[in-house]
Image (cartoon, coloured by chain):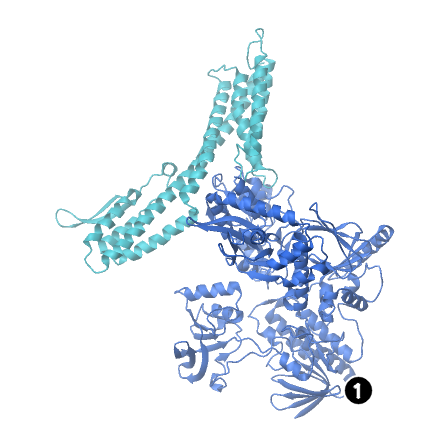
Chain colours: A blue, B cyan
Amino acid sequence: MTLHVHIAIIGSGPAGLSAAARAAQRDRARMEAGEISEPTHILLESFSQPAKTIQRYQKGKFVMAEPGFLHLRSDCEFGAGSREAILEQWQEDIARNGIKVRYQAEVQAITGERGNFSLALANGDVVTAEVVILAIGLEGNPRKLNIAGEGDSALADRVQYTLDDPEEFNGERIVVVGAGDSALENALALSKKNHVTVINRRAEFSRAKEANLNAILQAINDRRTTLDCLYETNPAALEADDDGINFAVETPTGRKVLSCDRIIARLGGFPPRKFIESIGIEFSSEAIDAAPILNGQYESSVPGIYVVGSLAGYPLIKQAMNQGYDVVEYIHGNDIKPADHELLEFQFGLLPYRRPPDELLHLFQQRIPMFSQLNVLVFRQLVIESSIWVALEGPSFENTKKQAAELAEAAAQRQPSPKTGKLIRAGESIFQRGDYTNTFFMIVDGEVILERHEQSAKPVRLERGQFFGEDSLVSGRPREYTAVAGSDCVLVETPRRTMIKLLNSNDQVRRGIDWIFTVRALQKHFAPELSPGELREIAQTTQLNTYQAGEPLFRQDQEGDCLHVIRRGAVTLQRSSEEGDLVVAQLQADELVGEMALMGEPVRRHTAKASVLTETIVLHRDSFMKLVNLDSSSISQLQARASKHARTYTTMQAQADKGSLIGFMMGEGMGEATNAMVIDESLCIGCDHCEKACADTHDGISRLNRSEGPSFAQMHLAISCRHCEHPHCMKDCPPDAIHRAESGEVFIDDSCIGCGNCVTHCPYDAIQLAHTPQPRQSLFSWLLKGAPDKLSIGREDADQGASGAGKKAVKCDACMNFANGPACVNACPTGAAARLAPEHLVKLVAKQ
Amino acid sequence: MKLHQSILEYRKGRYGWWALLLILGAIVLFGSHNDFQPPNGGTWQGYILGSIGLALIVWLTTLGIVKRRYGKSNVQAWTSAHVYLGASLLIVVSLHSALQIGLNVHSLAYVLMCVVIFSGFVGLYFYRRYPHLMARNRRNLSQRQLFSELNDLNQKGRALAKRCHPNLASAVDTAIDRTAIGGGLLDQLLGRDGSTVVLIEKDKKGGVQRRPVSNRDQQTIIGYVAKCIPRARKQGEAANIQSLLEVVCRRQTVTRQLRQDIKFNACLKVWLWVHVPFTIALLAALTIHILSVFYYW
């Protein structure tokens, strides 16, 4: 059977659905005008329902409508809400718009050219289309077990590749195949009411997130839970049985048959890249996550085939829906501006030159060499998420100031309000040394001067196309220099989260940033006189190493031929002797480790271990010699530093008790802290005024637990946020609600949705979920009306709907809004409580 | 700078120097009395000393308010000043009174003040000494962790005892049930141990007798379990009782630690029960003292 249409849309996710809705509306208009008699579009979906990826979300999952500043342009509705509400809405939209949709229609091949594409479906049907819109997302089709008996119709409803609601099953024997996060999450949820066996093809769970890994190992080792695991086991065959399924598996000790009621295979999906390449579409690079090459109207390298949605590099639902709308308009020859066009106009509003946003984007991208190869759409998204800084001098600053105020007012009137550029006076600082900001800056125009504060250091002048701020982004440490804007300078400031995403997905950008990080580290520590060009060759001979907590960089008594510059994390030096191991020093990011091997005795005096996840730049002897030969200006400094280190390490070595105290602190993760609460137990009288003060100043909920937490040698690390250098809590925060203040405090803003990811990620139990506080009652109203009914608080929250229990994550914010500093420390009557960074701690312990 | 500073060391004892200056000033002022005006609360020097004393007492009592206005001021600085200036009051007020003690409301105020100050000294002693001892006693654990360990030991002990002779099982069960920790104020302060255990023994007539006996410091049950080891008959029973002995001995250590911890905690609080009510009494007596002085001017 052959069907001919104008537009064939493949995939009914947000992008495909929105495109189909637009095409349907266009068709409807033409039908009403009598131009055509039937719709000229078709939406092809391989699954039995629309939006397969969202169907696969767990039941009741709250779906966000990010980014908040972008408005929706689509014939389908979408807003933040539960998975069910959104899917129901889209079913309604399909009917309302009159979308012609065909389910269970898996496209296996696309051939032909613009005006005459031929789409071969799995069932043998063929659809011919003039243009094709690919909106198949990145998930792909689920990988199957591929074993005998899998296709047996008797097993169809008992072998599944997704899990909607783990609560549906009770008292069953279930086998979960897979070792990724979704497999583990399913297994853990099912094990509450069922007997679960996990089949892992490997000897360990190396692909899982840490939280899932810990939970599954705990469950496997706990005899009380009904969850066990078979390692190094492969599925072999399936067979229906009166009693359920006989599932044959190959174990290291031979074939076994598992009798079970249900099999859930979570083996990931086939990435769609092969299929897309088979059509002839080209990708920007060989990297796994590279996006197809597209022009500004989403047309791929095959004319007539358009790509939208997450496959095009836009992972968010709202963006994808907007693209679906736009692409159909483009196909119909309507050259509309994208929905984010207006956002860019606001972003670029303060620039000293007026040009259309698309042209400016092109200009920006050309001026920053590192980004010149980036996908146009990815770069556009990067700029939208960034802030544009403009630095002007004297009269032009005053003129633009008025303009900036007007722009800000116009932006504020819009809902949601877009970002506007930042205007500063030339000569003002962009950030100060010691600020805890961790954004990344690119210079599009003008120059920026980086002022180091060491006496010998000369200011560094950066020009168009260069970037800065990468050191804090990588190390998580405060800024080491003050950046001052030159005249007529234009900068793009990109937030940490956007940059991390880009670094993880784009090798070229990561290599670029790693390279400049290394060059600047070499320049700073060894060769301040050399230019980046001169350092290029030596930088290429260095290595970047990553060490897990506890892993050694080098061992005592080994011969060393390299030194390490710590890029992120912290390293402890310990000396082993007959009396045991003794910690002699704790080194933070930006410090040198093992330099003695290159400047004195090659045999290592200490063992250097990463105390948290650590990255180092390794500089070998030859390169080091080359460096100091080229630029001898820093030799005396390096020697002075080496001899100072030798002295402090040896002094510490003579004081075993202090070494063991520091060793304990680092063992408890103090190496990654920036501000931790340390209580002297010999002074603490247990009055809990610290907790009371915390509760009193923070909505009645104490963010610290004095009596809990580890202790050693009368020093106690109370449970309270340590404001880590690379906060674990910031990972996977869906609304990006956790931030770091300029002064270093990590805090959670009001956009928290209470998902609890941060609670799981925090290794120090410093975050809790708590109800939104009631306003404080005055003594007078308490006397008149009595205390509020505690039960009513819970009821109110339950009515709030999607956010479920209405709890939000709360944690210590180090009293960032109080001029007097942390309330807990101020409230301590005996001086037992102090908040410290590890480097101060080490210094003070050594002095004591 | 040190990692942590005690209230006496705060800012190198800054308020100690203030207090010393105050005392010296008071002594000089007192010394300016002459033969025409012998030392007395009613001379101009006496009035100045009395006013200083009054101002100090009122200011010292505000610590109770300040330490509850969280996030506004540095309580350690206040406490340090409270201790030093409070102690100096002893001299200032004694000079004001010129040590004219009698059976009247004026001397009552003086005596109450002394009680408050000396109870403060006791508190200071406790604050300086006990936290250190407490930390040493808890051995890097918190009180909650100790209780949870005790709970685990109880479960383990009962499970092990179940596999032993019923008499031993019942003894261990009752020893766990009747372990007393804490109690009334005196029990807490003195660390009294009212634990008992019910032992099943044969009486002279050959009958069975259940006898509750003292199990102070878990000594009785430890002795009882230890005695059972050589009498074990069944295979593996001795090993089982040996493990049980380890559990009851560990219980002894944990209950000792807990009792000590409770005792120290009680000491850290109990002095305030004197210090604060006597302060209020002092304020009342002081008011009467001042009113009566002016009334009988």
Considering depth in this image, is A577 or A478 the residue closer to the camera? A577
Q: Quadrant of residue A405?
A: bottom right
Most distant residue in the bottom direction? A1
Q: What secondary structure is found at the residue carrying circle 1?
A: loop
Place of residue A101 in the rendered image (x, y in percent of width and height, measured from the top left):
66, 83
Q: Is residue A735 left or right of residue B197?
A: right
Q: Is residue A828 above or below residue A759?
A: above
From the image, tell me which residue sits under label 1.
A34
Q: Report the front residue among A184 and A471.
A: A471
Task: Pick whichever, A473 or A22, lies toward us.
Answer: A473
Residue A828 percent location from the top left of the image: 54, 40
Q: Quadrant of residue A407?
A: bottom right
Q: Chain of mark 1?
A: A
Residue depicted at x 65% and y 42%:
A819
State the quadrant of the N terminus of chain B.
top right
At x 30%, y 43%, the residue is: B217
Query: Is residue A506 visible from the viewing direction of this image?
Result: no
Name the quarter where the C terminus of chain B is drawn.
Answer: top right
Q: Residue furthest left?
A: B205
Callout 1, which amino acid?
Answer: Gly
Could you tell whether A606 is left or right of A341 in the image? left
The image shows a total of numbered marks equal to: 1
Q: Position of residue A579 (x, y in %)?
A: 42, 48
Q: Is residue A631 above or below residue A383?
A: above
Residue A448 lies, with reference to residue A20, above or below; the image says above
Query: Can residue A355 be spotted in the picture?
Result: yes
Relative horizontal placement of residue B108, taking residue A835 as reference (left or right): left
* Direction front: furthest residue: A629
Crowding around mark 1 (Cα neighbors within 10 Å: few <14, some 14 to 19, many 20+) is few
Give x and y (percent) for residue A205: 49, 68
**Residue B157 drawn above or below residue B50:** below
Residue B232 shown left or right of residue B78 in the figure? left
